[in-house]
Image: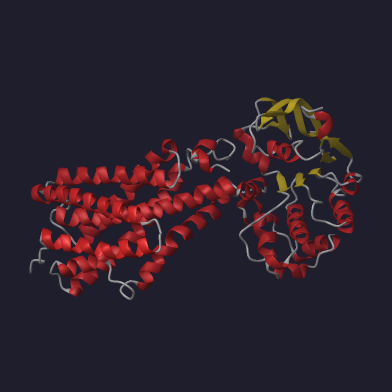
Amino acid sequence: MEQTLDISYLNLFLGYLLLAVPVIIFYHFKTGLIRDSLIAVGRMTLQLFVVGLYLELLFEYNNAWINALWWIIMVLIAAFTIVRRAYLSLRFFLIPLIISLIISLALIDAYFLGIIIRLDEFFDARYFIPISGILLGNCLKTNILGLNTFYQKLNQEKIRYRYYLANGASRSEALRPFMREALKTAFNPLIASITVIGLISLPGMMTGQILGGSSPEVAIKYQIMLMLTIFVATLLSVVITITLANRFVFDGFGNMKKQVLKKNLMG
Amino acid sequence: MYTMIEIKDLTLEFDGHKLYDRFGMSIRKGEKVTLAGESGTGKTTFIHLLLGFVPFEKGEIQIMGQPLHADNIEQIRSSTAYVPQELHLPMTTAGELFYMPFSFRQNRARHPGKKAIQKIFDALGLSTALLGKNLDEVSGGQKQRIAIASALLLEKPLLILDEPTSSLDSRSIERLANLVFNQEKRTVLSTSHNPLWAKHADRTYNLDDHGANA
């Protein structure tokens, strides 16, 4: 396989000179975005170099236990981030999210790496790390959207929920319309991106594989599998999280506990 | 069993002030009671209390002889039909609004036939053609009456209506009162400060005189 051409640090610096364009435009229109843009680029650089360092280590050792530990740490960080970004209480959601991410990710990783690719070494860093990372990143986005929609709507539209309950709906029947709306909100963007994939932009992983020397045919097959597994893993994680969390977030009368949402967002 | 609702020594604080202080009330089976009172006297909160949506600190509530408790709340709610003052459901047509409560497992056997629907719509001065219309073409008053028609056809022992007269003209109020208050076997608890409505009830209970502010 042909090696990808490296970018020297001097040339990378030349790349940063591109930033002069947004700086000049933002300055001209007095947008106040220059500081935020520079901080964002600074953070991106630092984060990616740190990620690069530990990925180097992971690839160098390529030890199943270390890779699995990385997987667990990523799941914990993702669960923590989802709870915070969806404005929910850590107390009620952290454990359900950790469990649901572990279940959905483990199942889909096993299917993709074990059954489809048939890896000899299931935890091989070259496959296990990037594929789990992409799945987890997508779970993060969809869970934030899904959980936020479900619990905020339930709080804002209490009248509707109570109307269902007081007319004989079981709790799961009364929650079903909210689940439907949460799934629509969370999955419409993903379905839309699956629909236009390849037409509007080349997906990141496919581009990476082609740059890395794979043939477009191989890259396409991986991309198809990746989109399918993202779809299923994210859907499983949202449904499992809400199902598990709902065992704790309601009182005996079916009312959502006040501590479930962050205080500033309670209606 | 002659008592539908029994409240003893109820104390409730809401938004930092005492809404009910050692409040008591009893409603007989089949009785039609209207709750009146100024805004802020807790009429809607009272209904939410009975349906288990608002926790109370002290006292006792019994519905159909059963204490209002988490263990039997589903059973209690299976005996109620409830229409809130304002109802915003994410539905397209008035028909979806009407049939929605019959989609719950517990109510499926109660799905009404064409004749029953026609009869109740006639009594309410509504056309059944409304059921095919989009909800944005239906007025607030019509929407409320469609939800009440649906609640009546559920044939539950306890009917709870929160401000059923708020969007209605006097003719529609008379029609609705004649229909609702002539349901012999059913207990009806409603909130309204409209005298046209209240005069049809067996009893009007003024929360101004009985709450913590009395």
The residue under the point 14% across, 66% down is: A212
- Residue B202: x and y in percent read 89, 40
Q: B58 or B211, which lies in front? A: B211
Q: Is residue A107 shown left or right of residue B126?
A: left
Tell me, what colour scheme is on the image?
Answer: secondary structure
Given residues B117 and B113, the one toward you in this image is: B117
Q: Which quadrant of the view contains residue A217?
A: bottom left
In the displayed structure, A44 sits above or below B60; it is below
Q: Position of residue A245 (x, y in %)?
A: 45, 42
Residue B86 place in picture, x, y as percent: 71, 52
Residue at the location (60% across, 33% down)? B71
* Residue B2 visible in the snapshot: no
Q: Quadrant of the C terminus of chain A?
A: top right
Write the residue at 76% across / 70% down. B129
Along the line of sight, the residue nearer the viewer: A254 or A111: A254
The residue lying toward the viewer, choosing from A177 and A40, is A40
Query: From this viewpoint, is residue B54 visible?
Result: yes
Q: Is residue A250 left or right of residue B60?
A: left
Quarter of the image containing the N terminus of chain A? bottom left
Residue lying furthest bottom? A199
Q: Residue at x 77, y 40 (%)?
A: B39
**Number of labelled discs?**
0
Looking at the image, residue B146 lies above or below residue B23: below
Single out the residue that lies furthest toward the front. A28
